[in-house]
Image: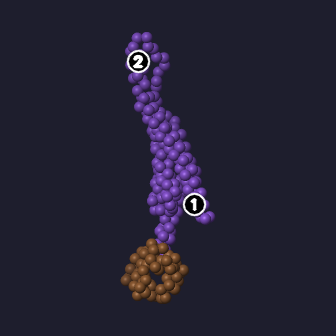
Chain colours: A brown, B purple
Amino acid sequence: MTIAVKLDRVLLDRGMSLTELSERVGVTIANLSILKTGKAKAMRFSTLEAICKELGCQPGDLLTFIDDGAPIRDD
Amino acid sequence: MKSAKKTSEKKTLATIFAIGLNVARGIIWISIAGLTVAMVFVPLLPMLIDWVTQFDNVHVDGDVEIEPGGLVKLARAFVSLGVGLYVIERLLELLRTIRVGTPFVAENAARFRRIGYALLLGEAGKFVFGIAGAAVGSEININLSVTSFIAIASVFVLAEVFAEGARMKDEQDLTV
């Protein structure tokens, strides 16, 4: 089971760079990169709220659930 | 600001501990050197006395007798000092991780586990040398105490706490 992050796609649609988003939402580029590359283990509601507000999108536009039959990550 | 002050205090404390441990390490090394010298020269003393008395006008009063129990005691001292040195080295590594950032890393859990095993080895050594001493007819106090075993158990518990801390830190680092 995987939660896929579609941040790069949304950024592309909005014509916004990761650096610009980082400055607008006050999250470091390093953290946004962790999110974009799918390495993140958790996401704060405050971060999700800030990104959705800046990009004018819904949480569902950023995150997708893919049921690939794998067990739930517990790391 | 308050957090920065706290971090600075934490690092100062780590430095003070490190100084104390370095002093202890120096004392242990001096003790090991002293024991090594004694181990090499004391068995040679009877030969040395024989050689010296060959010369005219040289007379040595008394005799050097090395009891087998003495060697067991010497071996026990080496093991105790070795364990002490090993534990101090690991503690210094632990303190270094506090000074450079965070102590909650998986390596520190492993370090605590190694400290626990070393202390356990030290206690087992006491027992083995006690029996060895009795076998050669010397009385060596085994001196096993419940407190030591509780302390060793605490070190293993601490290792598990650090392993969990490292896991939580990892999760925190990957929370965006």
Q: Chain of mark 2?
A: B
**In what quadrant of the picture does the C terminus of chain A appear?**
bottom left
Q: Earlier in the sequence, mark 1 or mark 2?
A: 1
Picture coordinates of residue B176, whole percent (x, y): 49, 75
Q: Amino acid at mark 1?
A: Thr
Q: Nearer the viewer, residue B118 or A44?
A: A44
User: Which SS class for mark 2?
Assistant: helix
Q: Which mark is residue B52?
A: 2
Q: Nearer the viewer, residue B148 or A8?
A: A8
The residue depicted at 45 percent of the width and 85 percent of the height is A62
The residue depicted at 47 percent of the width and 86 percent of the height is A55
Q: Nearer the viewer, residue B148 or A38?
A: A38
Left or right: residue A35 compared with residue B17: left
Give the residue number, with chain letter if any, for mark 1: B7
Above or below: residue B68 compared with residue A16: above
Distance from the alpha carbon under mark 1 to that under mark 2? 64 Å
- Considering every residue shown, the one lying at the far left of the view is A68
Q: Which mark is residue B48?
A: none
State whether discs 1 and 2 lie on one chain. yes
The residue depicted at 58 percent of the width and 62 percent of the height is B4
